[in-house]
Image (spheres, rainbow, N blue to C red):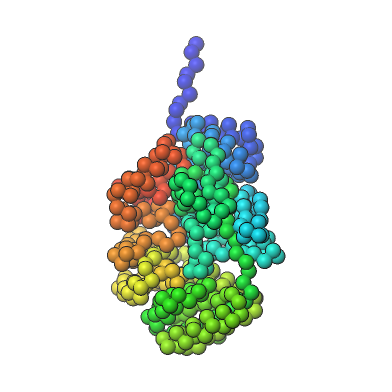
């Protein structure tokens, strides 16, 4: 009797891959519902699908072995850091494996004299900072979520300090990356600049797990500043707060952070973070750092410009505790806005424009929001021209339709002002529909060609970043 050939379906292939991986990794291959559910979605978009299994990697070799097996069986793999991404990045396609790197938390080397370090990709920025503080060092990129450094590389993240220190793009010197076949490569190195060959580090930073899985990262570090001072000032109208920011940036003031929260967001943050002595008014949060004289000079200039723009005075946070309370409130702004309407649908739109266009953009967005009748809070890393609109709608089909319409209007406005549909959150599935307008056919075709070269079977986070089919983006995801 001849044996029947095994069926070559996707469901069968993924089962075979999981059995093979179990022989290597044992209980680090997890198929329980609760673990699969944790890996079925990120934050904010209500899009979710269970992976067939979650593999917990502990080393570059584990990642390599996982990809080798998945490549052999043509099984999709979604790298997973902390799952804080906001555009549906980590939601797996059907019959996929989630590759969790959060156990890869080693600090491999800290080079105090060269101001750099090498870490595993699952380390969070908070853990890195807690470990290097006593050596007088810090890493400045600070997205609000408790993100991993690998996830931050993959989304080319930034945060409140990018106006002074740049984003992940400027702060990653080199990487170890596992390619779709399981091959391990190193990119970049420890030097601050190099003019040898194509910049592969830059290619992988921002590739959202679609070109390779990052396992180690060489990062720039900075000396802790001698003096740090933080302040809040409030305005009666949003235009004055925006004008203050634009003028500070345009005179080249080396401010460390300048963040805008509008009156809706401030009202929410005052309640959520129990901020005292502040009103629900448009507000700027500032931080100044450096030598004491330089900080005093920055503070004086900022006060003058803010008061000229009708600021209603400064509240100072002088101690480290006060400052961390202030910045925690800023980092919790998303949760504060969500608490305005528990159970509602919330989208965090993320646009960026050249700084000179910020005032026009924000005024237009306010008009769009008022006309839509939806609730929305505005906030942002305005020193970079980057701002977020947290759009809130009833969790119903009509609410979805209205929130998506408003989201498109806002993004369209930013793009028509020479801006981008995402300054920091990335594309995932939510921003795919805007890429053609932003990059044009030629650049998108080149991106597809790169993807095909590095991942010809399309196993690395398929369906993300590059628009593929006719129905894509938030609408498709929210309705699926
Ligand atoms: C409250 C809140 C505030 C936020 N504020 C900011 C902000 O200010 N600035 C900002 O930039 N973002 C912000 N974000 C978004 C989010 O924190 C960032 O996108 C972050 O970089 C995601 O990291 P993660 O470890 O959670 O990655 P995940 O969500 O796990 O993954 C994100 C993407 O990266 C891929 N990936 C993860 N790890 C790897 C790896 N090792 N190799 C290759 N690919 C990988 C995944 O496949 C996925 O495509 C915020 C999110 C929340 C919830």
| Left or right placement of residue 269 versus residue 372 in this view | right
| Left or right placement of residue 473 versus residue 315 in this view | left
- Comparing 166 with 113, the one in front is 113
- Comparing 234 with 119, the one in front is 119
- Comparing 309 with 336, the one in front is 309
Q: Residue at x 58, y 52 (%)?
A: 190
- Comparing 1 with 356, the one in front is 356
Q: Residue at x 57, y 75 (%)?
A: 289
- Residue lying furthest top: 1
| Left or right placement of residue 440 versus residue 302 in this view | left
- Residue lying furthest right: 134
Image coordinates of residue 360 in percent, x first then y, are 32, 74
Image coordinates of residue 369 in percent, x first then y, are 34, 72
Residue 37 visible in this rendered orientation of the protein:
no
Q: Residue at x 45, y 84 (%)?
A: 306
Image coordinates of residue 257 in percent, x first then y, are 51, 72
Residue 416 visible in this rendered orientation of the protein:
yes
Image coordinates of residue 12 in percent, x first then y, are 48, 31
Q: How many marks?
A: 0
Q: Residue at x 60, y 44 (%)?
A: 56
């Amino acid at each position: 009797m001849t044996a029947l050939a095994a069926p070559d379906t996707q469901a069968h292939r993924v089962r075979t891959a999981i059995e093979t991986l179990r022989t290597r990794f044992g209980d680090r291959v997890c198929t329980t519902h609760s673990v699969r559910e944790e890996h079925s979605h990120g934050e904010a978009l209500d899009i979710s699908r269970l992976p067939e299994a979650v593999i917990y990697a502990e080393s570059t070799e584990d990642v390599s072995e996982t990809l080798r097996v998945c490549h052999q069986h043509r099984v999709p793999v979604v790298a997973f850091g902390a799952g804080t991404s906001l555009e549906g990045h980590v939601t797996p396609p059907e019959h996929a494996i989630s590759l969790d790197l959060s156990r890869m938390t080693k600090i491999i080397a800290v080079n105090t004299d060269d101001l750099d370090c090498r870490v595993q990709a699952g380390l969070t920025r908070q853990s890195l900072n807690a470990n290097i503080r006593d050596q007088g060092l810090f890493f400045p990129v600070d997205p609000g979520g408790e993100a991993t450094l690998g996830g931050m590389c993959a989304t080319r993240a930034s945060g409140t300090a990018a106006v002074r220190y740049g984003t992940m793009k400027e702060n990653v010197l080199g990487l170890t990356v596992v390619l779709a076949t399981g091959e391990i490569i190193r990119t970049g190195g420890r030097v601050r600049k190099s003019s040898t060959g194509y910049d592969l580090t830059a290619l992988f930073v921002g590739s959202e797990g679609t070109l390779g899985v990052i396992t180690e990262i060489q990062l720039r570090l900075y000396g802790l500043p001698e003096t740090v001072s933080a302040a809040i000032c409030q305005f009666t109208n949003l235009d004055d707060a925006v004008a203050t920011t634009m003028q500070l940036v345009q005179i080249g003031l080396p401010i460390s952070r300048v963040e805008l929260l509008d009156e809706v967001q401030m009202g929410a943050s005052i309640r959520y973070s129990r901020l005292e002595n502040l009103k629900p008014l448009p507000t700027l949060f500032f931080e100044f750092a450096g030598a004491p004289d330089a900080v005093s000079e920055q503070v004086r200039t900022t006060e003058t410009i803010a008061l000229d723009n009708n600021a209603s005075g400064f509240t100072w946070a002088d101690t480290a505790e006060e400052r961390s309370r202030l910045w925690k409130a800023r980092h919790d702004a998303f949760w504060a806005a969500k608490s305005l309407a528990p159970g509602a649908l919330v989208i965090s739109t993320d646009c960026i424009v050249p700084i000179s266009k910020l005032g026009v953009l924000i005024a237009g967005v306010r008009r769009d929001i008022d006309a839509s009748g939806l609730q929305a809070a505005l906030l942002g890393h305005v020193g970079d021209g980057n701002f977020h609109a947290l759009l809130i709608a009833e969790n119903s089909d009509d609410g979805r339709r209205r929130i998506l319409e408003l989201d498109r209007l806002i993004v369209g406005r930013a793009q028509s002002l020479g801006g981008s549909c995402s300054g920091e959150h990335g594309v995932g599935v939510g921003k795919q529909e805007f890429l053609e307008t932003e990059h044009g056919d030629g650049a998108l075709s080149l991106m597809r060609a790169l993807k095909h070269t590095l991942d010809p079977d399309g196993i690395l986070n398929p369906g993300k970043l590059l628009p593929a089919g006719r129905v894509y983006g938030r609408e498709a995801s929210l309705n699926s």
